[in-house]
Image: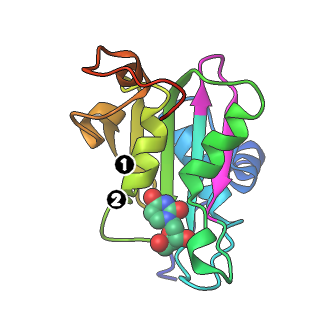
């Protein structure tokens, strides 16, 4: 007595276990939480997961992967983006990010913001908490007045040849 028991049907149970929720934001966040489980972070003990939604609905996940040579560690978001790009995807709709922080929404590091920005400024970023709550933002909001690939093509005072 007193214990709240949540009874779910078989389908719902399978959905929770496999993290295969209905489409949409909640689904993407669920996948980022699932990716977080694979985090390799023996140095920071700070797990991060990301789920990247491509234009055609394909989702690429990533987790942080650290290294004994500390500065070689790679963030979850960058891993997800690199996985997608290396499979021919460059057009993204959204990325969801998960961590174990209970009291704040995980916020991507500056390097990851720039990495996202490479593929456009007008796509969504969902910063989540372990309970599945989230804040919706965009790459442009996270990295205002950014520098991107288009800037390299703009008019310059000098055009140097062969890098000299
Ligand atoms: N980390 C991410 O994977 N994404 C972020 O946006 C913030 C930080 C990782 C890097 C490192 O493995 C650990 O979290 C602690 O900084």
Quadrant housing residue 152: top left
At 29% across and 14% down in the image, what residue appears?
155
Question: Residue 108 at x, y = what percent?
Answer: 40, 54
| Residue 107 vertical placement versus 42 (above, below) | above
At 63% across and 77% down in the image, what residue appears?
41
Asked if labels 1 and 2 touch by Cβ distance under 8 angstroms, the answer is yes
**Residue 134 badge:** 1
Quadrant housing residue 60: top right
Left or right? Give the position of 157 relative to 44.
left
| Residue 4 vertical placement versus 17 (above, below) | below
In terms of depth relative to the viewer, which is nearer, 46 or 29? 46
Q: Nearer the viewer, mark 2 or mark 1?
A: 2
Q: Secondary structure at mark 1?
A: strand
163 falls in the magenta region: no
At 62% across and 62% down in the image, what residue appears?
36
The segment highlighted magenta reads 53-64
* CA distance for labels 2 and 1: 7 Å
**Tag 2 residue:** 105
Left or right? Give the position of 89 relative to 26.
right
Question: Residue 149 at x, y = what percent?
Answer: 44, 25
User: Does the image show residue 131?
Assistant: no
User: Does the image show residue 14?
Assistant: yes
**Residue 73 badge:** none
Q: Residue furthest left?
A: 145
At 49% across and 31% down in the image, what residue appears?
94
**Which of the two discs, 2 and 1, labels the residue nearer the N terminus?**
2
In terms of depth relative to the viewer, which is nearer, 96 or 149? 149
Task: Characterize the local packing of mark 1: few (<14), some (14-19) or many (20 or more) Cα atoms within 10 angstroms.
Answer: many
């Amino acid at each position: 007595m007193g214990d709240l028991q949540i009874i779910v049907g078989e389908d719902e149970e399978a959905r929770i276990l496999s993290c295969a929720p209905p489409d949409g934001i909640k689904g993407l966040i669920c996948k980022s939480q699932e990716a977080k489980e694979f985090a390799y972070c023996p140095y920071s003990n700070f797990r991060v997961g990301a789920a990247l939604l491509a234009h055609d609905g394909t989702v690429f996940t990533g987790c942080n992967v650290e290294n004994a040579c500390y500065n070689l560690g790679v963030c979850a978001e960058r891993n997800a983006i690199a996985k997608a790009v290396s499979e021919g995807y460059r057009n993204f709709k959204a990325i969801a990010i998960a961590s174990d922080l209970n009291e704040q929404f995980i916020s991507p590091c500056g390097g990851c913001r720039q990495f996202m920005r490479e593929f456009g400024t007008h796509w969504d970023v969902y910063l989540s908490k372990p309970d599945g709550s989230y804040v919706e933002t965009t790459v442009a909001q996270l990295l205002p007045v950014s520098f991107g690939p288009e800037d390299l093509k703009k008019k310059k005072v000098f055009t140097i040849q062969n890098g000299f």
